[in-house]
Image (cartoon, coloured by chain):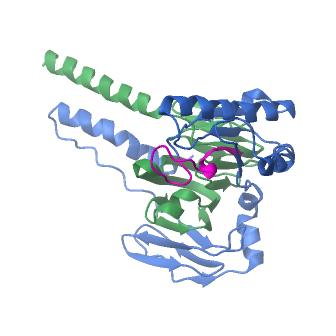
Chain colours: A green, B blue
Amino acid sequence: MRDLIVITVAMVLVLVLSVAVASAASPIGLVKVTEGSATVQRGDETLPARLGLALQEGDILRTGADGRVGVVLRDDTRLSLGPESEILIDRFAFAPAQGRLGLVVKMARGIMAFVSGNIAKLSHDAVRVETPVAIVGVRGTQFLVKVE
Amino acid sequence: MLAGERWYEGCRGSLVGGALCLMLLASCTTPVPPPVPKQSMFLVVPDPEGKVGQITVTNQTGTQVLDQPRQASTVQSANDAPSPPATLQETEIKQIFGEALAAQPTAPARFILYFKDDSEELTPESELLLPEVFRTVRDRGALDISVIGHTDTIGTRDYNYQLSLRRARSVADLLVKQGVDRKILDIESHGEDNLLVKTGDQVREPRNRRVEITVW
């Protein structure tokens, strides 16, 4: 039984480490507009969403009661949040030459304006916004979402 | 904050949790909690260029396609089908979404500068474009500028990598001379590997001898 636990712990460690390595990826975009209380949560870290902050896949953007934030992703997708809003940029892949295209945004609450970019232009089923009650497939270009 | 507000974090954790359960060869008895029902509204509007696109709103009970200006669908819960499209007034949209729309960033600006054959000297036409590049960088309060050099396929791959690096650096130097902070410059060299106009090897193609600038 003890062996089993040791093996289990080791395997979990490997899994956790590989997730950590995967999340330390190259920037996928940056913060272009910020006002009031707005943060980016990256793993256990919470960073103020200051102008020019580079974003990574897996980042959670969050605004407070007086907060707003606007970001541009590498494929020209533009996302902006009003107050009391929260999204997770769950997946971002923009490597057309390798055929890797995808953008998945999970929205927990608040209001968001979304202008799709080149990923949606190049691939019809690659861009998705998920809320707790439904999934949006994005052919383009501008749409708005409110999650209560 | 409600527990349900982190519904997606629960999903992420379940991978590790699931693997752990499997490895312990024990049955995983904690069921994933069902998402808390949360009403959502989805709305298509013309983009900043005036074009109306299309979105589909789907859950397990139905789908709606929205492709007309200001068409909205609401979803009461994951078990309720998306409502048929209804058209909202501009004033309602402003009222509900104004704060998010106010934070919308502008799209990055892109420029292509062309170079003389086997040289980091700009073509006369591209020289003329420089003032507009500088103006854009200034007016936008650029936060990040990507400068990527390219070549055509004449010469070896290694030579072209060096040549396109020199091209990118010469453009970067021009920007720095205009007062741009070097720290916001992101200089790359793609050599002959990222042709604008596809050609075979050893082909002279003026349109491939370029530096692409993206102003964020």
Residue at x 48%, y 52% (from the top left corner): B199
Residue at x 72%, y 67% (from the top left corner): B48
Percent across and percent down for residue B45 are 66, 73
- Image quarter where the C terminus of chain B lies is top right
- Judge whether residue B3 can be spotted in this image: no
Front-lying residue, A53 or A45: A53
Circle count: 0
Residue at x 36%, y 29% (from the top left corner): A18
Residue A127 in the image: above or below residue B58: above
Residue at x 22%, y 41% (from the top left corner): B28
Please tell me whether residue B32 belongs to the stretch shown in magenta. no
Picture quarter containing residue B134?
Answer: top right
> Residue B56 vs residue A71: left or right?
left
> Residue A147 vs residue B101: left or right?
left
Percent across and percent down for residue A26 are 53, 34
- Judge whether residue B60 can be spotted in this image: yes
Picture quarter containing residue A52?
Answer: top right
> Residue A71 vs residue A88: left or right?
right
Front-lying residue, B210 or A90: B210
Residue B34 in the image: above or below residue B210: below
> Residue A108 vs residue A69: left or right?
left
Front-lying residue, B31 or A35: A35
Residue B76 in the image: above or below residue B180: below
Q: Which residues are magenta?
A: B195-216
Front-lying residue, B187 or B82: B187
Please tell me whether residue B200 belongs to the stretch shown in magenta. yes
Residue B82 in the image: above or below residue B1: below
